[in-house]
Image (cartoon, rainbow, N blue to C red):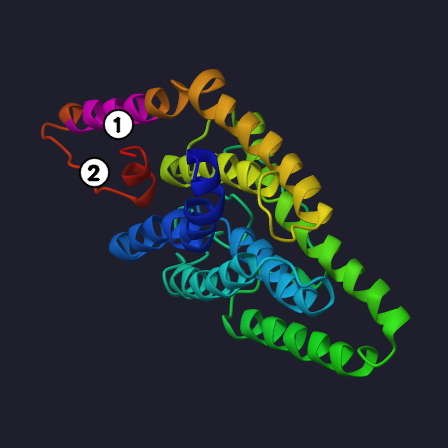
Amino acid sequence: MGIATFISSFVAPIFIIISPITSYADQTHSMHKAKSSAGFSLDIPLIMLVASILRVFYYPGAQFDTSLLIQSFIMIAIQVVLLKVALDHRPGPSSKGGDAATPFAAARGEFVAQRPYNFWQWRSPKPYWQFLLYLFISLTACELVLSPMHRLYSLYSNFIGYSGLSIEATLPIPQIMANYKSKSCRGFRVSVLISWLLGDAMKMFWFFTATTEIPWAFKLCGIFQMCCDTFLGIQAFILYADAPQADFVKGHDQKMMNGFANGHHTRTPMTEKDVRLGD
């Protein structure tokens, strides 16, 4: 057995299955440890939960590789935990960075339009879980009603499959726009970006070398997401590589100067944003 065959048959599927944990466990632990989710976008669990739930309901009609199905279930589990931690540690509206429900609220100077019915920007945790429950119930009802109608069900299955994968492929776009407007990648963990890039490379290799069934919906959306993640990497490591640290140092030095000017040294507490800079 060649190395390429071994990677495609064994390494890649295992990597795909555990990728949700390697991608988001660090982010979850960081927010829990800092007791703050300031700067973290609640749109990340929204996108991944909706995409993964749709992918699960896409499986009966597409019968794609079971590794992707297992990954979807694990992704749902880790995103539920991530959402719970983010909601539990959201700063209040009056505190700095308190607009935690706003997507990528850490981006400086970003204009955020009001969403209809304040969708996914609610202050109470209850509507978030209600939305996910209603989505699951609706998809279950459609599955039961449409599955006997084979021709219609085939169209429906393809629709939710492409919809879910397209939603997932848009995950990097809000962060790319936020970075562009703020001219910085501050507020976005490098560990998450690296896991995305490694995951993209492994997915592309597996999608085009696997002997099992991988629908073209996965391949096309995977290519698009890989391009977005690659551009996000260019922003983080080339275009705005020095901006986050420079901004932090400048602000920190100003606080120190103010403290000395008042006759004493002022120690500023470490925030969640400061923790991210160590990645």
Residue drawn where x is 41% and y is 20% of the image: 243
Q: Main secondary structure of the magenta part?
A: helix
Residue drawn where x is 42% and y is 52% of the image: 14
Residue 113 in the image: state x and y as whole percent.
Answer: 68, 46
Task: State the image quarter where residue 268 is shown.
Answer: top left
Residue 135 in the image: state x and y as whole percent.
Answer: 67, 72
The answer to whether residue 239 is above or below residue 62 is: above
Quarter of the picture containing the N terminus is: top left
Tell me whether circle 2 and circle 1 mark residues in contact (CB < 8 Å): yes
Q: Identity of the amino acid at label 1?
A: His
- Give the magenta-colored segment's residue range: 248-259
In the figure, is residue 236 to the left or right of 157? left
In the figure, is residue 113 to the left or right of 14? right
Please give the residue where the numbered disc 1 appears in the rendered image. Answer: 252
Q: Looking at the image, can residue 111 be seen?
A: no
Task: State the image quarter where residue 69 is shown.
Answer: bottom right
Residue 151 in the image: state x and y as whole percent.
Answer: 90, 69
Q: Which mark sits nearer the N-terminus, 2 or 1? A: 1
**Residue nearer the viewer, 252 or 140:** 140
Residue 226 in the image: state x and y as whole percent.
Answer: 58, 34
CA gap between label 2 and label 1 equals 8 Å
Residue drawn where x is 66% and y is 65% of the image: 59
Please give the residue where the numbered disc 2 appears in the rendered image. Answer: 268
**Magenta includes 251?**
yes
**Residue nearer the viewer, 82 or 257:** 82
In the figure, is residue 194 to the left or right of 231? left
Number of residues whose C-alpha sits closer than 10 Å to that of mark 2, classed few (under 14), some (14–19) or many (20 or more)? few
Q: In the structure shown, which secondary structural element does the residue marked by tag 1 occupy?
A: helix
Q: As drawn, which residue projects farthest toward the left?
A: 264
Number of residues whose C-alpha sits closer than 10 Å to that of mark 1, classed few (under 14), some (14–19) or many (20 or more)? some
Q: Identity of the amino acid at label 2?
A: Thr
Q: In the structure shown, which secondary structural element does the residue marked by tag 2 occupy?
A: loop
